[in-house]
Amino acid sequence: MAAVMIGVDPHKGSHTAVAINATEEPLGELRVRACVAQAEQLVAWARAWPERTWAVEGADGVGHLLAQQLLSAGERVLDVQPKLAARVRLLATGDTNKNDPNDARSVAVAALRSPGVRQARHDDHAAVLKVWSKRHRDLGRTRTQVACRLHAVLCELVPGGVPKKITAGQAARILASITPSDAVQAARCELAAEFTEDLNGIDARIRDTRKKLAIAVAATGTSLTGLFGAGPVIAAAVIGDVRTVSRFASRDHFAAYNGSAPIEVSSGGRKVHRLSRRGNRRLNHAIHMIAVTQIRYRHSPGRAYYDKKLAEGKTGKEALRALKRQVSDAVFACLQADARRAAAAAPESPGGQPGNGSASSAAGSHPEHRLFGQATPGPATHPTTPAGPHAPAGFSEPLPPRASRRAGQGPGAARPRSGTRRASSTRPPASR
């Protein structure tokens, strides 16, 4: 019997499945309610096609639970991005009405014809990092919203308000110094006190989430926290979104995925490269924060590279974009090193990045190379480690690249900027 592709359009209350053959002819259709037995009903319906593959739209989103249930049932599941299915629906020449059966068929066609569709995997430790990373991100957004509302109320109580970033303790001291003169001002003081209490609670939850992130990241044994400017929060965001580094053929593919590689815009003989606003924006933000942290500290190799680009005539934004590309390569090298270490370790290991264990030919991708930041003593002395009982008492300067090999050659043997020169000399032309 010919192989069959079953596309699934998942929703909160129901799931629609459409089966097609290799020539895209529909073979069957089923709609099931979102319930405990949803996967069993779909598998029982699909037993008529022993050679089958499931294509779930958004297997990391709305269809995540269904995809995991199908995987647990021993089925082969593909993760189809909604954009691919939308393109199939847009270019279809037949019935293109927007409904669940047509959407499910578009998902199946996209999985059948697109070579880059990713196979869904069982949840692993990276999913834990993604859960707590999203929690930390959501709490940060909520805190910003509450702080803005508190600022607005304080502007009506104190002339000029609070010009800088506000904390719960600062707001409490300001409110304690105010004596309401009428009922309106008393109501505003009471509202500001509630916002202050909310802010204090959110700050406590953020601290708790950071502690959980630090524990979860430590369980992976990742080398990402050895990069200058990458703490547990950044490492969790990167590992949670990347999951398997082997799906990226090279550091250039990884840079294109995270949006740090410029895109080519050409017409005739004119060819230019522009800032890319594509890719995974969460991963792009993590790389941006690493780059900004390195620029903030003058002794960091990233700051040396940034100053070098400024001296070459680059603007501040252009130099930052060039540094972000170098940071992307360094992150990719760490993920590859973690994958090789996880492949060599026992399969019972709780973390790591399973993937390609072969050594990359790209310069700086070998685990002994730490571009833009040699390993620091650990999260407890890292400048981006969250505040709390394990907060650093001071700042530990990172070692220069390959300094350990030159320890016996005298104090001038290890030059702090050697790592940046090696990284910039191997940088692809697109990032210049």
Image (cartoon, helix red, strand yellow):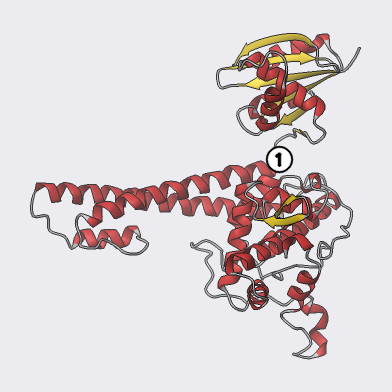
Q: Amino acid at mark 1?
A: Asp
* Residue named by callout 1: 124
Residue 381 visible to an observer of this rendering: no
Residue shown at the point (48%, 54%) measured from the top left:
207
- Of residues 277 and 202, the one nearer the viewer is 277
Q: Is residue 266 above or below residue 296?
A: above
Question: Residue 47: percent from the left, percent from the top?
Answer: 80, 11
Where, by quadrant of the figure, is residue 285 drawn? bottom right
Question: Residue 228: percent from the left, percent from the top?
Answer: 65, 68
Query: Which residue reaches farthest front?
Result: 268
Q: Quadrant of the N terminus?
A: top right
Q: How many marks?
A: 1
Where, by quadrant of the figure, is residue 10 drawn? top right
Q: Is residue 72 above or below residue 384?
A: above
Q: Quadrant of the C terminus?
A: bottom right
Q: Is residue 244 above or below residue 15?
A: below
Q: Residues within 10 Å of mark 1 (few under 14, many from 20)?
A: some
- Of residues 8 and 221, the one nearer the viewer is 8
Where, by quadrant of the figure, is residue 329 drawn? bottom right
Residue shown at the point (38%, 49%) measured from the top left:
201
Question: Residue 367: percent from the left, percent from the top?
Answer: 81, 63
At mark 1, the secondary structure is: loop
State left or right for residue 275 relative to residue 403.
left
Query: Which residue reaches farthest left?
Result: 182
Residue 238 visible to an observer of this rendering: yes
Question: Residue 394: percent from the left, percent from the top?
Answer: 54, 75
